[in-house]
Image: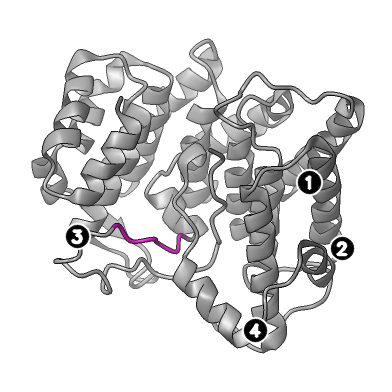
Amino acid sequence: MMTNLPMPSEVKAADAGASSNDPTPLIEPPSVKLIVRLFLIPLFIVAIAVGIMFLIGRLAGGTPTFEEALTRLKNPGGQRTVDLLIGPGSKQRYMDAKTLVDEMKGGMTDEQRVKISRQLVEILNNHTNDSEGDVRHFVLLAIGRVWQVDPNHPAKVEDASAPEAAAARGEAMQALVNFAQSEQVSNRKAAVLALGYWACRDEVQQAMPMLLEKLQNGLEDFDVRLSVATVLGPLSTPADQKVISALHRAMDDADPAHRELVWAAALSLAQLNQPDVSATMLMLLDRKELANIEVLDHEADPKNPAYRKLSEFEQQRYLINTMLGAVKLQVPEVQQRLVWLRDNDPSPRVRNAAREIVH
């Protein structure tokens, strides 16, 4: 099944709304920062916040058709006040975004991919700007999502439309590379995460030198480096020695404030079946270790970040996200820990996720 596209809004995780007695897994509204901070691998990103989109739908009106959504995304949205979009135009643009997501979730023909990709690139370049909230970030992620290879059929190639599809992919890749080098940090993060959808696509090799430079550049924004560490695993193979070396260097970062970068690099290396990261994987799959971990919280008070322990809900996310990478690490102790979590973890959410991941 193709993965869902995340909405890049700044909505906080729904920890406060979760009932400790409700075993039903919650659907979270992930932001670009949240995706990166929890190092979700792009091939298994959490579902869009259905409740949020339903509320937007009630405010904005009926659900548009796919063509209406593409057309309306060319129109200006509402104005921005602090961190919130206001006005019916902006609400409708979010409904337009949801329509595109729903269409892509249903699968696309090669001809549809070409058409949608080119329209999205045109919208990105000519009908979005940095002042209208997260619409530009959504479009960047959508461009990446259009060309995602179905993981159930990774060997499939375009048929009659191959030359046209190749040209459209080239245009899309160039747009993502351009925005990955934007002056706006949020644009760079969204573009890097969008590149994560291009696993199994030859065009992604064009972006590799830029991604490796950002990972190793200490002057680059930390969250952008974290984004790069997150996507390199899915985009690479165990034969990519430059990538493996760069990820190992990232793991050598001894700054406690950068431990999430170390974990993200380790997770990508686990996906590349590098056994020397097994100790880190075992730590991130251990409930007792997670209960004592402290992370630097940049979101509660960005000007005065402080260390804090993970909530139970966050521990569950760490377990699930680590399992996604660790399942590819052929180390007996790691595989045994995954089976144990599948059968014994106290959280139904974790056990259910493990059943999907561990076979």
Residue wearing tag 4? 60
Residue drawn at the location 53% of the way across and 17% of the way down = 237
Report whether 265 appears left or right of 2: left
The secondary structure type at the circle numbered 3 is loop
- For marks 3 and 4, the one nearer the N-term is 4
User: Which secondary structure class fits the magenta region best?
Assistant: loop
Q: CA distance from mark 1 to mark 4?
A: 30 Å
- For marks 4 and 2, the one nearer the N-term is 4
Q: Residue furthest top?
A: 239
Residue wearing tag 2? 126
Q: Amino acid at mark 2?
A: Asn
Residue 79 x/y as whole percent: 69, 85
Task: Please report contact status of discs 1 and 3: CB closer than 8 Å, yes or no.
Answer: no
Residue 138 x/y as whole percent: 64, 60
Task: Please report contact status of discs 2 and 3: CB closer than 8 Å, yes or no.
Answer: no
Rendering quarter of residue 279: top left
Magenta highlight range: 25-30
- For marks 1 and 4, the one nearer the N-term is 4
Q: CA distance from mark 3 to mark 4?
A: 34 Å
Q: Quadrant of the C terminus?
A: top left
Residue 175's disc is 1
Residue wearing tag 3? 311
